[in-house]
Image (cartoon, helix red, strand yellow):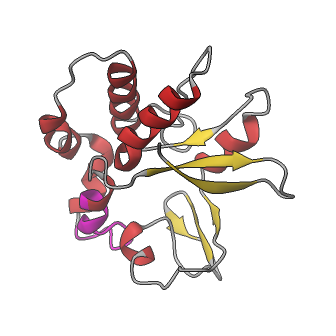
Amino acid sequence: LLVGERHARRLPGFDCGNSPTELESLDVVGRTLIHTTHAGTQGLTNATGASEVLTGALVNAAAIVRYLRACNPAEVTLVRMGHEARERCDEDDLCAQLLLARLRDEPFDTGSIRERLREASSARKFFDPACDWAPARDFELCTRLDAFDFVLRLDRSDSPPSLRRVDAA
């Protein structure tokens, strides 16, 4: 399946864009997904110096923390890709703050995450009827804290490199 976007729009000829609402309607079990995003793919490509690369979001934040604790790396770098890999965005900043707090065993108000992000300028598109490419359900799906119990790890032994599911310990 071809999944991807440029400037938040589905690429021509692709099965779906970067919309979780679109993706949940597809049968992906046992299928290979080729996924490209404007910012995320650039981040993976540019992470050549890292010994290990994980992708993450609010939906798998707890799994990321468990995975990192089990691996116990000497150093962890959190990279926020932001909007089109050029501008900071609230959802990436908030996710990084949450991961950092959890890694340090510090308190974090998770109850306000959805409310805080709903007020973010980057969330406006989900509630704008003119933006039919950004359904409100995407916002709900993307802000489901700890919904998935796995991480996606970059596997450079593949050509081209791929993301592999690793269940959290």
Question: Which residue does the image show at 61% across and 21% down from the upper left?
Answer: 73
Image position of 42 with respect to 32: above or below: above
Question: Which residue does the image show at 20% across and 38% down from the upper left?
Answer: 113
Q: Position of residue 166 (x, y in %)?
A: 57, 51
Report how many numbered discs are placed on residues in the image.
Answer: 0
Image position of 30 with respect to 149: above or below: below
Q: Which residues are magenta?
A: 129-140
Task: Point out the image quarter for the N terminus.
Answer: bottom right
Q: Position of residue 136 (x, y in %)?
A: 24, 65
Image quadrant of residue 96?
top left
Image position of 31 with respect to 166: above or below: below
Q: Nearer the viewer, residue 24 or 118?
A: 24
Q: Nearer the viewer, residue 140 or 11?
A: 140
Q: Is residue 71 left or right of residue 158?
A: left
Question: Which residue does the image show at 66% across and 50% down from the upper left?
Answer: 41
Q: Position of residue 26 (x, y in %)?
A: 47, 84
Q: Is residue 121 left or right of residue 64?
A: left
